[in-house]
Image (cartoon, helix red, strand yellow):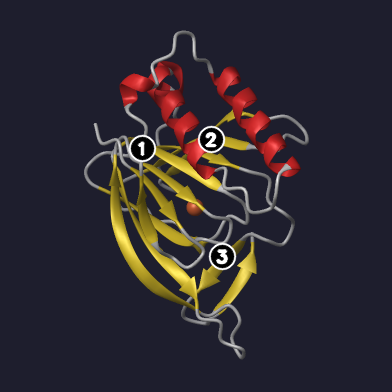
Amino acid sequence: MNTKDWLITDQGECQPRPAAREWDLIREYYYLHRFLTEILDLVERSKQESEQWDYLPQIRRLVRQLITNSYWVQTQYLEPCPQTGRAIMTLYDEIGYPLTIQNVSFAPGVSSPIHNHGTWGVVAVLKGQEKHRFWRPCNDAEFPSKIEPTGEKIFRTGEIISFTPNAIHSIEAIGEEPTVTFNLYGDSLPQSRFEFNPTTETAKTF
Ligand SMILES: [Fe+2]
């Protein structure tokens, strides 16, 4: 299994990050609810500390701890819908809950729109492989939503990809079998998540 960690920045750079060794992460009885409690504690602490506090390394480590120890999380997913080629299984939610936790399945060849998330995110590839393309804003005064590609990379089972809130990417499931990813996102502000159209150089909220 691949155990690499990555960071995608607001400028569309894909940077390798040190990953915890799996054998340092073995825990007995590490359930989803324990993971969520640890994530919420981290997010709460981040609000009390400076804006600059970088919580993504700790969150990546906890996500790796979760996928290393939780067979349940590894096996909760739906087959992609025959019409759309996608399926989303929400692993936990309630009204006002400040995290999004989903296992997402993509059939081979299915791709996402170009988008940001408006909040931090950590994605772990549980099955298959997917190609990400990265983009950065052009900072064009006339076309504020103009973006340009900065690169692409294939992520395989076991890799963890983290995103800063304005990182822009698009995804394509590649290979022979459906791709399954574990997705964790923070709370996004209204009007902060965009789908970009590089042809018209516009963006719309989603
Ligand atoms: Fe995304």
Determine contact: label 3, label 2, CB under 8 Å: no
Neighbours of disc 3 within 10 Å: few (<14), some (14-19), many (20+)? many
Query: Label 3 is placed on what type of residue?
Result: Glu
Ligand 1 under 8 Å from disc 1 Cβ: no
Give the residue number, with chain letter if any, for mark 3.
Answer: 195
**CA distance for labels 3 and 1:** 30 Å
Residue 19, numbered circle: 1
Classify mark 1: helix, strand or loop.
loop
Q: Quadrant of the N terminus?
A: top left
> Percent position (x, y) of residue 119?
62, 52
Toward the right, the furthest residue is: 96
Q: Which quadrant holds the C terminus? A: bottom right
Residue 187 shows in this picture: yes
Identify the mark at residue 102; answer none if there is no mark.
2
Q: Quadrant of residue 80?
A: top left
Q: Residue furthest bottom?
A: 142
Number of callouts in the render?
3
